[in-house]
Amino acid sequence: MQPELNGVFEKVNFTNNSSIRLHINREYEDYPIHWHSATEIIMPLENTYSVTMNKTQYSLKEGDILIIPPGELHELYAPPTGTRIIFLFDFTLVSNLKGFSSILPVITQPRLVTKELCPDIYEKEREILLEIAREYREASTLWEASIYSMIIQIFVLIGRNHIDSGGLFPDVRTNKQKEYIEKFNKIFEFIDNNYTEDISLETVADIAGFSKFHFSRLFKQFTDTSFYDYLNLRRIKAAENLLLDPSLPITEIALQSGFSSISTFNRVFKAFKKCTPSEFKELYRKRNKEMN
């Protein structure tokens, strides 16, 4: 089943009145370079499967799990025979849950979960994905709510594995690790409550009790991104929700999301989402029109 493409954008044909789509793919055909506004999870059940994303090739073995965030350009290559789960869903419904902000950079990057890379969580992740496939197939009462509860479990496991790995702050003594994590959780809460304001690195470093240089280094270790990139990511996540409101103009959305100008908003949004705010808004408008 080839995706329906508009340029390189793939229109995801979700199940009627739903924001979820899962299919067991057996086709011997490649998917050309494309992106979509849904999060995608792929797990081969039989034989291998290949994905190229950000110039990185992922050669998936049976049981390997690859999570592709929204907006990522990627290509899919199928072997002559094989079976794989391809699962797509609207990530905005879970990304703004309280507490998720501390792992936002982790769960909005491509994530490969294998037995070798993630031995502590791999089996549980695989079991959850198989259970999602069963729930989708049977479509019992409240099946969508059940699946979203399992999606949350998937990302909670990834987040805890990242935070509890002990390698977040390699230069910090073990007995200080928990203290630093608690400080950073307070910082993420502060950003959640104030991202619409003009927050400076110096202000946040002072709240954490670090020099701005030390704070910058620790923040990078914790999130795999810089403070200002994280702040922009948080603002973009807020903008995504506002863009779903057809009555809000783009300029108002930019201001409500914490951007000082429409030009900055357009530039940052496109860097993160691979489309402009207007294009993103139009994609959701078309999708809702088709669903209704």
Image (spheres, rainbow, N blue to C red):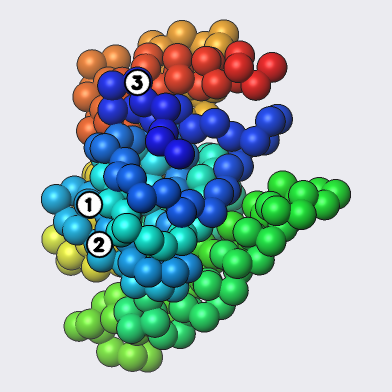
Q: Which residue is mark 1?
A: 52
Mark 1, Cα crowd under 10 Å, few <14 / some 14-19 / many 20+, is some
Callout 1: SS? strand
Residue on which the image places disc 2: 58
Q: Secondary structure at mark 2?
A: strand
Q: Which residue is mark 3?
A: 6
Q: Quadrant of residue 175?
A: bottom left
Q: Residue at x 52, y 72 (%)?
A: 125
The image quadrant that residue 187 belongs to is bottom left
Give me the residue at 43% from left, 57% from top: 42
Could you tell me the amino acid type at mark 3? Answer: Asn
- Residue 11's x, y, as percent? 45, 27
Q: Could you tell me residue 180's position as x and y percent?
A: 36, 74
Label 3 residue SS = strand
**Vertical placement of residue 116 versus 139, above or below:** below
The numbered mark, 2 or 3, whose residue comes first in the sequence reads: 3
Residue extending farthest to the front is: 80
Q: CA distance from mark 3 to mark 1?
A: 20 Å
Camera-nearest residue between 211 and 181: 181
Q: Residues within 10 Å of mark 3 (few under 14, many from 20)?
A: few
Task: Kindly identify the residue that appears in the image at 66 percent across and 66 percent down.
Answer: 131
Q: Circles 1 and 2: CB distance less than 8 Å?
A: yes
The amino acid type, in three-letter code, at marker 2 is Tyr
Look at the picture and state if 65 lies above or below 55: below
Looking at the picture, which amino acid does disc 1 mark?
Answer: Thr
- Residue in the picture at 33% in, 90% down: 174
Mark positioned earlier in the residue sequence (1 or 2): 1
Quadrant assignment, res 182: bottom left
